[in-house]
Image: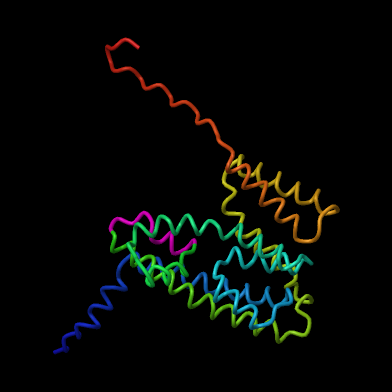
Amino acid sequence: MSEPTPPHRRGLREFTALPVVRQSLGVVIACGAFAISFGAIAAAGGLDVWQTMALSLIMFSGGSQFALVGVVAGGGSPWAGAVAALLLGSRNTFYGLRLSTLLGLRGLRRAAAAQVVIDESSAMSLGRDSEREARIGFYVTGIGVFTLWNLGSLIGALGAGALTDPAAFGLDAAGPAAFVALLWPRLRDRETWAIALAAAGLAVLSVPFVPPGVPVLVAAAFGIAVGAWPRREPPLPDRPAPHGEAA
């Protein structure tokens, strides 16, 4: 006769069986693997292990980190890289505004939770059927990604730092490639494609006239200006008149 399962093990098994937990853990593992590439790219771009880890611990926003490293590796100033990272990271402010109401946190707990407000934790929290699922999705994803992202960054930085010439392995081209990989899933319609191509064209045209790193800011400023431009909503289609009623 088998012994009954202890209550704490039964509770853990029921917790990990929740769909939101399984989905969150899948996102955590994928981000951890991606962090290895960031560590390698940062090392190839000239950052040492401590600088790479400082970015992952303090900034903790993949898109912003890739932007900063990409600008610096391309010859831009750290200030230009910081501005590019700030522009990309500003979206987390809007996530935080929505999550602060949903999670209902105050004081130090709110400040601590703000550190893990990223795309992934917001996506796994917002739109859930209950407040409990929203909290589980946010904390499991946020804390899990933070842990594996820093671990992956360390592994990538140490691994690339051990290479005598990272550029010989093509790691110098990995930064722009990773940036394109982040952008690609967002190009879903003609309007987005047109904006992206126009921004890229402006960046290329500005290269001879501005310092390295600034073309990225030109493209980002153009995208923000187009996104903030007020649009006229198309008129709603007329509803068909009920049977027997004059239109």
Q: Residue at x 24, y 77 (%)?
A: 11
Q: Is residue 52 left or right of residue 213?
A: left
Percent position (x, y) of residue 214? 75, 57
125 left or right, relative to 90: left
**Within the image, what quadrant is residue 122 found in?**
bottom left
Q: Nearer the viewer, residue 47 or 29?
A: 47
**What is the quadrant of the C terminus in the image?**
top left
Quadrant position of residue 212: bottom right
Residue sticking out furthest to the right: 208
Query: Where's residue 23, x and y in %?
Result: 39, 65
- Please state if 101 lies on the left or on the right of 189 as rendered: left
Relative to 73, residue 229 above or below: above
* Residue 7 on the magenta segment: no
Picture residue at 66% right of the left edge, 47% below the top: 196
Instruction: Find the magenta span and give its range.
Output: 119-130
Residue displayed at 86% across by 53% down: 208
- Residue 209 coordinates in the image, percent (x, y): 84, 52
The quadrant of the rendering that contains the N terminus is bottom left
Determine whether 33 is above or below 237 in the image.
below
